[in-house]
Image (cartoon, helix red, strand yellow):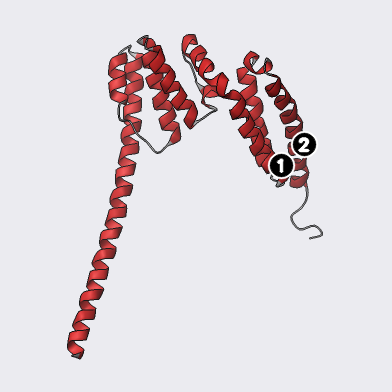
Amino acid sequence: MSRWISANRIVSNASATVLRTIARLAVLLVMTASLSAQASARDRLQRGRELYASAAFEEALAMLEGAESSDPSVRVAVYQCRALSLLALRRDSEAQQEIAAMIAIDPTAPTALGAVPPRFRAMVLAVWLPRLRVIVQQHYAQGKTFFRAGAWQEAAGAFHVVLNLLDYADAGARSDRVLADLRELASEYLALAQDRAGSQDAVPDNPGH
């Protein structure tokens, strides 16, 4: 009887070991697949950009099809390249959809478009400006939250983003009274946060030692 119990324990332990090994292998496979997908997305993005630069717009779109990545910066770049290709093909409504998807991932993306055709920049602004008030209010609220928590550097960073967004939007932001008020408030909070961050840095960690 004791031999049967010992044998049963050995089998149970072996089964548990096998299951743990299978679970680890599954995790490794998922991680490998994810890394492979990201590398593939970057490769597709690079090739898509090259095709766009050579005016092979349909081919660029085909190359970017299925270029999925968990990296937001890669996804934003893919949407931008797709939008540029669609705009070059005069498929404006589809280009606007890609731009909207790009902004949904990174609301600050329009401030870092790089060298793009003026027509594309104008389209991005046209899609972005109606959303700007909400985007700015979100970053301003984030800054206020950091400020109340005494996280001065983080607060300064958030208010700096607010001002960068409004500076980029320029005339579109200046004509909006709410955004104009937020610009003034963000400027004041930024100055306060920077001043308090500077004062905090000037205080020794262990006074008297």
Vertical placement of residue 176 versus 13, above or below: above
Q: Is residue 49 visible?
A: yes
Label 2 – label 1 distance at C-alpha? 9 Å
* Residue at point 66%, 26% (across, down): 163
Identify whether 178 is placed above or below 89: below
- The vertical placement of 149 against 20, above or below, is above
Considering depth in this image, is 89 or 49 the residue closer to the camera?
Answer: 89
Q: Kindly identify which residue carries mark 1.
A: 147
Q: Quadrant for residue 208, please give it.
A: bottom right
Three-letter amino acid code at the position of disc 2: Leu
Q: Which mark is residue 24?
A: none
Instruction: Say which amino acid is labelled 1.
Output: Phe
Residue furthest toward the right? 208
Quadrant in the rendering for residue 57: top left
Would residue 161 be found to the left or right of residue 77 on screen? right
In the rendered view, would you say 76 is above or below 203?
above
| Apparent side of residue 48 relative to residue 10 in the rendered image (left or right) | right
Q: Position of residue 196 (x, y in %)?
A: 77, 41
Query: If the image is split into quadrants, where does the N terminus sit?
Result: bottom left
Image location of residue 209, percent across then percent down: 78, 60
Residue lying at 53% horizontally and 28% vertically, measured from the top left: 107
Tell me the SS state at disc 1. Answer: helix
Q: Which residue occupies the foreground of this view, 114 or 192? A: 192
The one of 147 and 127 positioned closer to us in this rendering: 127
Q: Residues within 10 Å of mark 2 (few under 14, many from 20)?
A: some
Q: Which residue is mark 2?
A: 192
For this orientation, the residue located farthest to the bottom is: 1
Q: Residue at 50% across / 10% down in the picture?
A: 118
**Element under disc 2:** helix
Q: Residue at x 61, y 18 (%)?
A: 169
Image marks 2 and 1: residues in contact by CB distance under 8 Å: yes
